Structure formats: structure tokens, C-alpha cells
Image: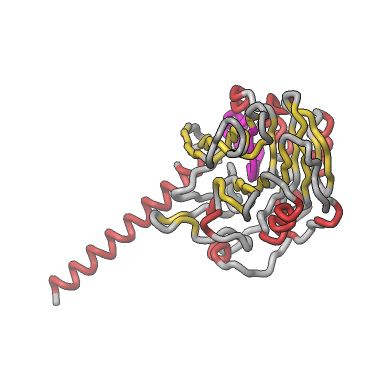
Amino acid sequence: MGNLARNIGRAALGTTAVGTATLAYAAGIERRHWTLRQVTLPVLAEGARPLKVLHISDMHMTPNQTSKQRWVAALAELKPDLVVNTGDNLAHQNAVPGVIRALGPLLDVPGVFVFGSNDYYAPRPKNPVRYLIKSHKRVHGIPLPWRDLRAALVERGWHDLTHVRRLLTVDGQTIAVAGVDDPHLRRDRYADIAGKPDRGATLRLGVTHSPEPRVLDAFAEDGYDLVMAGHTHGGQLRLPGYGAIVTNCQLDRTRARGASRWGGHMWLHVSAGLGTSPYAPVRFACPPEASLLTLVPRPNSANGHEGAKDSARFGADADVS
């Protein structure tokens, strides 16, 4: 019994050590392991020139996250044709200047945005295990200065797509865009933008923060080519061979990040996002990311692209927090 007890004790200590090391990696290293994911999607009209779209989401910015700000600002070197921001930019009352510093060079590029729940309300301390529970009562934190952020973005020429439909000209091509307010808070009113988008547009693009199936179904029914969303953090905690544990919405786990088909015509792209709640600052097997989407003509066009191609590259820096 003595040897058995010692062996059990060693195993317990070993398990504890592995768990501690994993937590340290998830909290101290991976959550700052900035990643650029690149994907090619066949969603444009026949004969269209390819478009580069930069997808940014879920920065959850706090004032001292300077390395995140530098990394996002450097994405302007990719020279995107359009920037799509799918919300949850803020995590602190004083974070608007940091978000504008991060987006600064990109604000010279055509851009569209919607807001998420953490643009409206600050995060609150809570048991992190609640994140793993699909349905739980939501308690709002203090209001955040989303109006100030909106004013700054609009002043630089970006378009707020909250319950709005627009036609944009990007690189000489017409894009029909539409968006809804955050479905996670049930603020979406799809009826305000319902209807078929311009059939002559090079791209018909829908934008939402949370990729709730009811909203995705509505976009698909109206004939959109692509919907872009965030919110899921890619699961934030992923298990090798299993993937995301949860999506924090009604979307299935297999679509927690990246590109997937939604119905017979539409594509969905979900960003795993660039941040976390300050009260759950961990990521595992799911580094923070922005995505560069290269959009090309659909398969029945002369170019003959067949499906999505996905890759990622990584960078690292250190934040104060």
C-alpha cells in the first residue's frame, strides 16, 4: 500500500503540474500570440476582380494593451480593399482611444462595422465556468462609451451597418452591404433590412456580431453571398481532436471559427477575435486572430475557384496585462 500511495501521490502532483503549466501558457502566452488567418472564398460575381477584406473582431480593448494596438495597426500593411469590424471593441470605459490607435491606419481604408454586447456594457467578474454553460442569465455591466467610438469611426468615413442597407463602391466594384445589431442581446431587427440585395452587385455582404442561426437563415433566404461575424472567440478554449467546447451562442461548435457553408449558396466567416474578457484572460489551442479574406469569383465563373482555402501565420509581442 505504501508504494501505491506514493505512486498515486506522484501522479496527482504530475497532473497538478501539467494543469498549472497549461494555465500559465493559456493566460500568459497564447492570448498574446497574435495570428493572421488567411482564407480564399469564392463569393464574387462572374468576371469580378478579387477583393481583399480584413476581418477584425472582439478586440475587448483595455487602455494598456499596447502590443495589441501596434499589431492591429500594422495590419494596414496588408493593403486591404475593405475592413469589416464585427464588434466587441471595448472592455473598459477608457478604451476608446486605444481602439482608435489600433485602427488608426485602417481608418483610411473603406470600412463597415456593427457593435457587440461588450461595446454597450462592460464585462463583470463572474465564475469562468459559466462560460461553458450554454444558457445562463446575463447580467450587464456598466455602460460603455460606444457612442464616442461610433462618432470616431463615422468621422473617418466608416459605415455603421446597424439595421442599415447600403451600396458601397470598393476598388471600383459595387458591394451591397447590410447589418444588424447584436443578436446575442436580442437587439437584432432583421425586418428593418429584409429584402433581396442588389442583384447587380459584385458582392452581397451581411454583417452581424453574434452568428445566431436565425439571423444567418434570414441573410441566406434573402440571397446574400457572405456573412461575417465574431463573438465566439473561436471557442476560446479548444481541445485537440475535439475543437471548440462552446460557442456562447446557438451556432454549432464546428463553425466556431473560420469559413463554412450556410445553405446552398451563402458562406459564413466567423472570426475567433483578438481578445478576451479581462475576467477570463485565457486562450488554449485558439490564438487571437484577425483574418484576411481574399474574395474571388464563384466556381461557375471563368476563374473556376472551387472552395475555401485557409491558412494562418503568427506573430508575438507582450502586453502589460
Q: Is 48 in front, or is 118? A: 48
At horizontal 63% and vertical 42% (from top left) the residue drawn is 59
At horizontal 54% and vertical 36% (from top left) the residue drawn is 305
**Displayed quadrant of residue 127:** bottom right
Count of picture labels: 0
At horizontal 56% and vertical 49% (from top left) the residue drawn is 260
At horizontal 78% and vertical 29% (from top left) the residue drawn is 169
Residue 193 shown in magenta: no
Image coordinates for residue 314, horizontal then vertical, percent: 47, 34
Q: Is 112 in front, or is 315? A: 112
Image coordinates for residue 106, horizontal then vertical, percent: 69, 27
Position above or below: 20 against 302: below
Image coordinates for residue 281, horizontal then vertical, percent: 54, 50
| Residue 319 in view | no
* Residue most extreme to the right: 192
* Residue most extreme to the bottom: 1
Q: Range of the magenta residues?
A: 53-73
Looking at the image, residue 21 sits to the left or right of residue 95; the answer is: left
Looking at the image, residue 36 sits to the left or right of residue 114; the answer is: left
Position above or below: 188 against 115: below
